[in-house]
Image: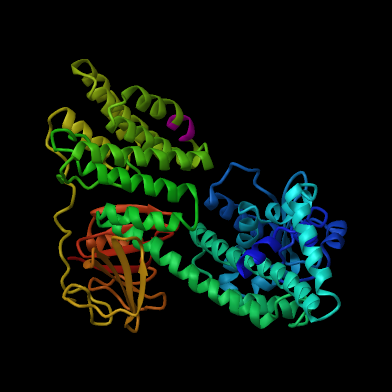
Amino acid sequence: MKKTIFLLLLCFPGINAFAQKGSWGEFPMVPLKSFSARAAESGKIKNTPEHAQALKVYERLCEARGDYRYPVPEFYLTPKELVAEIAYDAIPTIYLGITAYQVCQSFGDQADAAMAFLLGHELTHYYEKHAWRKSFASNHQDLGISQQLDELFQEMVKDAGQGKMRNKLLRFDTLTRQFNDVAMETQCDYLGGFLAYSAGYGAFTQGDSLIRRLYRAFKLDPDLPGYVSLSEREKLSNKSARKLQDLVEVFEMANWLTTVGLYEEAYRYYRQVLSEYQSREIFNNVGATAMLQALKLFSTDELIYRYPVQLDLEMANSRGDDVETLRKKLLEQALLHFDAAISLDPKYAPAYVNKACALALLGDPVRATYYADVEARQAAVGKYAANLPMVEVILGILEAKSGPDGAQKAKVRFEVAMKTDKTGLAAYNLAVLTKQPLPEDVPANTGFFEDEAIDGQNPFSIMFPEVDKSMQIDNVLNFTQNTGMTEHSRLYINSKNGKTSVLFQATKPDYAGETARGIKKGSTQQMVIQQYGKPQQVVYTPTGQLFRYAEVIFVMKEDKVDRWVLYAIK
């Protein structure tokens, strides 16, 4: 009964704090002046070095979110006394206070990450439609259900008289509203933090310190009436940081599983991320891993060409009781995810290329040709120019499979693609078409590196790993960790149906040691290739690239080693 009353109180039209005051959102990370006062005195700072720096951070966040179903809010610095807020005017606008900007600068090389934390928080309010939810009750007071709920609440207060029960009801009303605000603030710390991570700013874990510095900069009372105390706000930030770290670790596991070719497991991990955070890249990755699973269900004769899926392929076969039905189901599931990515960003070329591949594999050459030659080609401009040779590759495959008359057209397509293709797919498919020797997939100088270790340990000989952290991904997979395997590394374990399937030992951010071949944090991409040869596989992520070798994965950020991962597949 108490739970029911709690839910009803959230809907009472009398709770006017749920409504927008003027055009401003109502979710201050740090409480300052009234919103109506701020709206009246708002100013804009632009065309300054400070604005340029903050705008660069903001644009990276919007690009990483990749959701263009709604207008992207404009952005300005403001001289007024606020931290970061969103105004819901005719053109939504996000403001970052100049004082808050200066506080972020106090974090040194983490200044941009601190700004990303604040701005990601506000963008999350916008994309999660928090202001709409809060204003709904106020804007619909004329609904019959709203009037009945309001009357019921007033009767409860009246029946309670002037005694303690009345005060308790009113207090419960206030706390309910505050709890709702706190829940949304915590969600924005968490999902906004993941947005900042996906934009390449890392997992910013100093939210509590940032909030404390903001309180100090604005000379605020740490125990303001009607708002959670500073100590409580710091605790909430710490909890959000831990939850953010969990989501980042699940996402990283999905990337690593993809890199080593365990696509079914990767698909399930990406789905777990998708249940919390939606972006075009996550939808695309879920679809791509579903398609990669399906590719394993084609025979060698059926799949002589390599398709330009946006995660490189591993050519392998597997059999099942009803292979055709299973692979059709996987490909249709992949199409749904690609459509979801396109719905967020109609100019997202990788999803169009992947969709064309899925349609081709489903035996629908007409639609596959349209999505490759029209949709993907139109989207593959500017930052997506690398997809243009992929368009030619998939069209070449479709021509080659159309019959004897298509061979010459396919040859032309592959030759055009080879001029700009850096993946080797065009050259491989041309060799298949012309019955020439196939290019080597893996150079001779890549192999097993048994002497690799971190702090003198590696995952290759572990039989029964100790764990101190566990998360159930679904009814098949379990994700466990040993967060202190060594001083400078942690162990990530994926178990399938109760049995360990793969172990990853990853360096921690502060590790200054070297690999067996002298590679360390900060080593360039060229140095890695000089020591280890050309990678067996390269996977692109929102934060950089993953280079896979026989037993080690290098996590690259801005073409430099950020850390590395040793792995053992059981």
The picture places residue 233, in percent across and down from the top left corner, at 65, 77
- Viewer-nearest residue: 98 or 181: 181
The picture places residue 132, in percent across and down from the top left corner, at 69, 51
Q: Is residue 318 left or right of residue 198?
A: left
Q: Label the magenta part by its dominant secondary structure.
A: helix
Please give the name of the residue rendered at 32% of the width and 46% of the height, measured from the top-left corner: 290
Please give the name of the residue rendered at 37% of the width and 25% of the height, measured from the top-left corner: 367
* Residue that extends furthest to the top in the rendered view of this protein: 405
Q: Is residue 282 left or right of residue 208?
A: left
**Residue 542 placement: quadrant:** bottom left
Write down the region rendered in magenta: 376-380
Question: Which quarter of the figure is the C terminus placed in?
Answer: bottom left
- Viewer-nearest residue: 229 or 65: 229
Please give the name of the residue rendered at 50% of the width and 50% of the height, measured from the top-left corner: 279
**Residue 491 placement: quadrant:** bottom left
Question: Which quarter of the figure is the N terminus placed in?
Answer: bottom right
The picture places residue 514, in percent across and down from the top left corner, at 30, 75
